[in-house]
Image: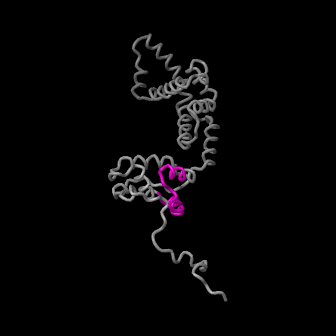
Amino acid sequence: MAALHEDDPEIGSLNAYLSGEPAQAIVMTPGLAVIEVKNNVLTVMPHFYGWKIDNPYEFLHEFCKLCGIQRRPAGSSEEEYRLRAIPFALKGEADTWFMRMPPNLIRSWAEFRSIFLDYFFPATRTNALKKEIQGATQEGDETLSQYWGRFKGLLDACPNNRMSEAEIYNNFYEGLAPESKDLVNSSSGGDFSRLRLNEARKVMGRLIDAKKAYDNPRAQVLRRVPVHAATDQADDKMEAWMDRFEKTIDP
């Protein structure tokens, strides 16, 4: 029987003799070594678990905001503070992923961000969400404002869609139901799709603001108080326009 050698151990013993601290994926620099993440910071720190419903972009945004307002020792940077603090923010599956990283893999915040997003927001997820944005349509019982809100939610879910603002407005417009498209076109002086970007912003802003103003209880009371015949006639025209607007926008 062949003798067992230290460099040829039994498979079951591979994890039994590991000594020392676990290897760290983030390279420890002098600036990192002097940073202490305080308990009061840990209590308010956002956490990322790696669940499907988690948005890694939102997490990084909140995490960086918190790191940006913390005091740091002289000679250390905000980037180093982020790298020092990030292991405390990762929980569950995300923490397991981080612990399995090769040692000394990460030397900068840009490297961590790239690796993190590649894993938790891969290109396949981006492409699927982008297709959803491009194929969005106003549903039969959905008002203009509801569709606009849902459309913006799709954009928020995919911040790396790399679509220009003009593309975004065009996709929204093309997905409108015929009645809503007519309303948007009439508010655009004929054809919304031919507007310059700045004008398109203004048109959509006016439509949404008009809805908010119309829903204001004080505005509703004022519309019901006639002053004289001319005002009544103007109000009647406004009511007729708003009735049409309401069919499209109001729930």
Q: Residue 231 placed where, x, y %?
A: 43, 13
Q: Is residue 57 left or right of residue 78?
A: right
Classify 241 as above or below 82.
above
Q: Compare residues 73 and 157 and report the one nearer the observer.
A: 73
| Image coordinates for residue 114, horizontal then vertical, percent | 54, 50
Residue drawn at the location 48% of the way across and 25% of the way down = 210
Up the image or down, 191 lies above or below 146; here it is above
Residue drawn at the location 50% of the way across and 49% of the way down:
110
Q: Is residue 54 magenta?
A: no
Q: Residue furthest bottom?
A: 1
> For this rendering, which residue is in front, 198 or 145?
198
Per the rendered image, the range of residues in magenta is: 90-116
> At which x and y percent is residue 118?
57, 51
Q: Relative to residue 125, is residue 169 depicted above or below? A: above
Residue 228 in the figure: left or right of residue 193: left
Residue 32's image quarter? bottom left
Find out whether residue 112 is within the magenta segment: yes
Q: In the image, residue 50 lies at what x, y percent? A: 53, 56
